[in-house]
Image: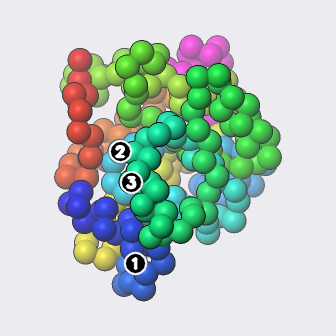
Amino acid sequence: MFGQTLIDKVVVMAGIPNKFTFQFEGEHHLRQLIAAGKGGILLSAHLGNWEVAGHLFKRLETRINIVMFDGEHERIKQYLSTVTGERNVNVIVIKDDLSHIYAINDALSNNELVCMHADRFLEGNKTETALFLGSNARFPAGPFLLAATFRVPVSLVFAFKESATHYHLFATPPREYHGRRKQGVQEAVQDFVHVMEEKVRQYPEQWFNYYDFWE
């Protein structure tokens, strides 16, 4: 399944003629988020085929920013760009000098979408612990802290392969995390974990999380 989604990713991003069909469940939630005029954060995970979802979000007709670590599989990304061309998105690179925080702030101020994964962390980074599928697991604190700090609408988005040529995309109703920052972070983590548990149970073969997840 992982191999299939990688091939699908290249086909869709490269614009190669194909027979793929897509069901958008919750697209109106994202349009509602954009219409609010405050920008928004889209959280996802290494679950399903995010690249397919991200490539198709151009339907939303707004600028999309993807937050990622510098040098993350750089050679693979360079090769893919020669096949697929440049992505129709802006990449915000996470840096030690925290300049990415200003870039995210600018994007949200311009009513743009900021997308990031919220299920993996690098050693040494701050984490939040939550009960996930019956045992404690650690999640990166960064995405949830951003959600609570900027107080913009947050939607959880996923795209799953349901047949050889059909994908099902999901987006949850946008929610803002107010209150004291720590409380907002914990509420955001719990919402994310709840939806992620639901999707992992629904699509267990599409959770591509190849490292020790639980404590």
How packed is label 3: few (under 14 Cα within 10 Å), some, or many (20 or more)? few
Query: What type is the residue that disc 1 sits on?
Result: Thr
Residue under pointer 2: 46
What is the image's colouring?
rainbow
Query: What type is the residue that disc 3 sits on?
Result: Ile
Where on the picture, by quarter, is residue 9? bottom left
Residue 87 visible in rendering: yes
* Residue 133 percent across, percent down from the top left: 23, 31
Residue positioned 46% across, 16% down in the render: 126
Q: Which mark is residue 76?
A: 3
In the rendered view, tell whether residue 29 sits above or below residue 56: above
How packed is label 1: few (under 14 Cα within 10 Å), some, or many (20 or more)? few
Earlier-in-chain disc, 1 versus 2: 1
- Residue 182 located within the stretch drawn in magenta: yes
Residue positioned 64% across, 64% down in the render: 60
Q: Secondary structure at mark 1?
A: strand
Is 196 positioned to the left or the right of 91 in the image? Answer: left
Q: Secondary structure at mark 3?
A: helix
Looking at the rendering, the stretch of residues picked out in magenta corresponds to: 176-186
In the rendered view, tell whether residue 9 sits above or below residue 110: below
Earlier-in-chain disc, 3 versus 2: 2
Residue under pointer 1: 21
Q: Secondary structure at mark 2?
A: loop
Residue positioned 43% across, 41% down in the render: 72
- Residue 91 located within the stretch drawn in magenta: no
